[in-house]
Amino acid sequence: MAKGLAYVHHEYLEWVIHCNVKPENILLDGEFESKISKFGLAKLFQRDRKNPEFSCIRGTKVYMAPEWALNLPITEKVDVYNYGVVIVELVKGIQLSNWVLEDGEEQETELTKFLRDVKRKIQSEEVAWIEDAIDTRLNGEFNRI
């Protein structure tokens, strides 16, 4: 999957921003290699163009990068953010959300809690932080490489 994103971001003739990387848009072939699908929301730009403009927010809220909400320039980094959320969901074994509103106010979310907890453990040089972050249903049976 990461190779596919790198290709559309850096090697393809034009610059492609997918805008909707999420589990539903990741397919597996017969060799269980992941493939990016559903480019319906994608934008195609000339490589030399700086600050591409978008007419509207694109993507699925759960995976949406902060740049969309903060009205910051949209680059391939929004796809990298989406991909990161997908990886965290895969490793953690739960669906995360980075946009939760209650009574019109944003609340702390599973994604925010998870990232803050991992950051704290890394900064305190806690050795077992990876094991704590992995889906408990794996019962510790995963490759630690």
Image: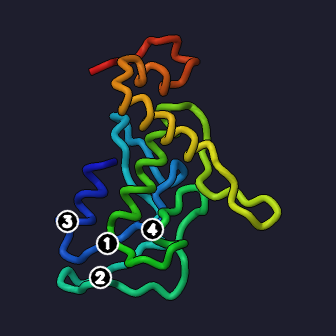
Tell me, for residue 16, which label it has, or none.
Answer: 1
Element under disc 3: helix
Tell me, for residue 45, which label it has, or none.
Answer: 2
Under mark 4, the amino acid is Cys
* Label 2 to label 1: alpha-carbon separation: 6 Å
Residue beneath disc 3 = 10
User: Dot 2, how many residues are within 10 Å of its Cα: few (below 14), some (14-19), or many (20+)?
Assistant: some
Q: Position of residue 91 (x, y in %)?
A: 47, 32
Q: Position of residue 115 (x, y in %)?
A: 48, 41
Colour scheme shown: rainbow
Q: Is residue 122 left or right of residue 59?
A: left
Q: Is residue 100 left or right of residue 43?
A: right
Residue beneath disc 4 = 19
Which of the 4 image quarters holds residue 118?
Answer: top left
Under mark 1, the amino acid is Val
Under mark 3, the amino acid is His
Q: Are marks 4 and 2 in contact (CB under 8 Å)?
A: no
* Label 4 to label 2: alpha-carbon separation: 13 Å
* Label 1 to label 4: alpha-carbon separation: 9 Å
Disc nearer the start of the sequence (2/3) = 3
Element under disc 1: strand
